[in-house]
Amino acid sequence: MSLRATEDDSGTEIHLPADIDWEMLDKSKFFVLGAALFSGVSGMLYPIVVLKTQKQVLAKDMPCVKLAVSILRHEGCRGFYRGFGTSLMGTIPARALYMGALEMTKSNVGCVTVSMGFSEAKAAAIANAAAGLSAAMAAQLVWTPIDVVSQRLMVQGGNTAHTSAVRYNGGIDAFRKIIQTDGVRGLYRGFGISILTYAPSNAVWWAAYSMAHRAVWGGISCYYLKRDGNGNGGGCGGGVGFTPDSKTVVAVQGVSAAMASGFSALVTMPLDTIKTRLQVLDGEGSNGKPSIGQTVKNLVKEGGLSACYRGLGPRLASTSMSAITMITTYEYLKKLSTKDQDCHAG
């Protein structure tokens, strides 16, 4: 499915770079370069994730700035990177699963939907939603145990509600103690709600991104045509086409990603808060094991519906920044990983 040219309702044509599908990629280069690039992105955004996680499990809410100052004062810069080594260890295989499932699903579903007679815009939205859903489910098999461990390290020693009394000396020690206490199931605590959070969130994000991407290009085409006097009396029509430069392409990708991530974060924030508490807190259910019902009751008791949105500011910031860097890095990665053009000649 190519994005080489898109059209708005009036026939204005925008010539975009051809989309790079799964068959065009050098898989080895794609996964190796992807691991390196996304590890760097994770390192940049990790302090915001720490802030978001700590806010979600605080016994009493605290402004982000005050919490950040408290972490800096008591632990220094290292406090913003608690559990980062463990998180990074899981990022590489999780991203590999995510990217592989994403590209294969997008390519296959895209071809099927086009053959079924859907328009290119609808086919792209459906393919992106299906790809986001399958990619999230595949990645969670690796990411949930890493999430459980890294989040426990993030909140260890903080002013949180009912955190585990067990002290962890790094990621390996946390893995060992969780397995000793709860078995392998302990590493998958919150797996179900993680799927309920991230699978729909990814489906919504990729579908929203596809639609936002086309909508933004439609707005840009109108702007350029009106500015150049080709708007046919103020409209956007005329069948005139233009080819945007690479900076414009990247800017549109970033804006579309931010729009999609903002919507997705607002919809799934309560589930993310519940998931984090299930994975981190103890003593909220029978035998010290938390339950979804008790976790929701405790949140409502602590602050009503607004308690479910604790950490929304950091999450909006982290998801928007992550989405912008992810999509621009991802598209750049695909360009770097394409096979030699000779392979596709003819």
Image (cartoon, helix red, strand yellow):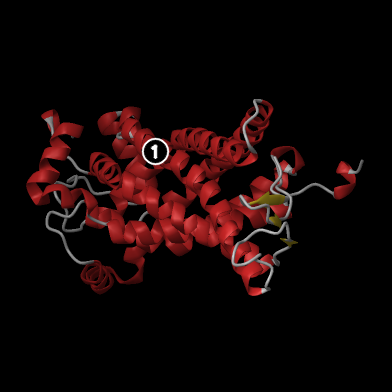
Type of amino acid at the residue the image marks with label 1: Thr
Give the residue displayed 31% in from the left and 52% down from the top: 153
Residue 1 location in percent, x, y? 70, 40
Where is residue 221 drawn, in percent x and y? 63, 62
Instruction: Find residue 242 and report its horizontal and vertical position in percent.
Output: 73, 63
Q: Is residue 137 left or right of residue 192?
A: right
Give above or below for 147 relative to 159.
Answer: above
Residue depicted at x 11% and y 48%:
304
Q: Nearer the viewer, residue 20 or 297?
A: 20
198 and 39: which is toward the camera? 198
Question: How many callouts does the rendering have?
Answer: 1
Residue at the far front in the pictured view: 233
Q: Position of residue 256 (x, y in %)?
A: 51, 56
Q: Is residue 79 visible?
A: yes
Q: Which residue is denoted by mark 1 in the rendering?
A: 144
Residue appearing at x 60%, y 42% in the figure: 121
Please identify the quarter of the rendering in which residue 59 is found.
Answer: bottom left
Q: 17 or 89, which is in the foreground?
A: 17
Tell me the SS state at disc 1. Answer: helix
- Tell me if residue 305 comes above or below residue 132 in the rendering: below
Q: Foreground residue, 70 or 112?
A: 112
